[in-house]
Amino acid sequence: MAVTECFPYLRVSDAEAAIRFYAEVFGAKELFRLVDPGDGRIGHAELELSPGVVIMLSAAYPELGIHGPSGGAGLGLHLHVDDADALLDRAVAAGGTLLRPAQTQFYGERSGAFRDPFGHEWMVGHSVEALSPAEMQRRWDALARG
């Protein structure tokens, strides 16, 4: 068996608002959506963040055991972007909550994090230095020692 693709699948309280938010923050392009004929909820949508980078989402369906995050995200999504600072600014301006401002990290990336209005945590970063895993470990060890 071979895994050929992996798509983050987000469950949100308001799928229409989430699609607008992701379009504004990430420049997401909606590929398509399936609308529940009974109540109009978005049962499935696919958004392309950039060529080959797709996320899927749906409205919550509590009656089917499908819920959005509550009390904090159980998973975070990490995106490599051109400019982490600019994307964090855009996310906050669109209604996201800044969790960690962008900082240059020991592992050679400038990164920060925000929570979107639907409870999902997004870590965004851009490379500032190419490092080997051994060098990252050396730096981490040095930080841990103080």
Image (cartoon, rainbow, N blue to C red):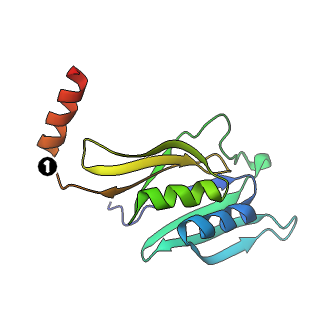
Query: Which quarter shows the C terminus?
Result: top left
Q: Position of residue 33 (x, y in %)?
A: 68, 74
Picture coordinates of residue 145 (x, y %)? Answer: 20, 21
144 on left or right of 7: left
Nearest the eye: 133 or 62: 133
Front residue of this view, candidates 49 and 34: 49
Residue 138 seen anywhere in this rendered image of the structure:
yes
Above or below, 30 relative to 10: below
* Residue 40, image quadrant: bottom right
**What type is the residue that disc 1 sits on?**
Ser
Secondary structure of the residue carrying numbered label 1:
loop
**In which image quadrant can residue 14 be found?**
bottom right
Q: Which residue is drawn at the image coordinates 18% and 28% (left, top)?
A: 141
Image height of 75 relative to 80, above or below: above
Q: Which residue is mark 1?
A: 132
Estimate how packed mark 1 is, as few (under 14), some (14 to 19) or many (20 or more) residues with alpha carbons within 10 Å. few
- In the rendered structure, the answer to whether residue 146 lies left or right of residue 7 reads left
Task: Check the picture and name the quadrant holding the N terminus.
Answer: bottom left
Which residue is pictured at 50% across the width and 60% down the height? 87
Q: Where is residue 30, by image quadrant?
A: bottom right
Residue beneath the point at 84% across and 71% down: 37
Position in image of residue 35 (x %, y %): 77, 71
**At which x and y percent is residue 121?**
54, 46
Tell me: residue 138, above or below residue 26.
above
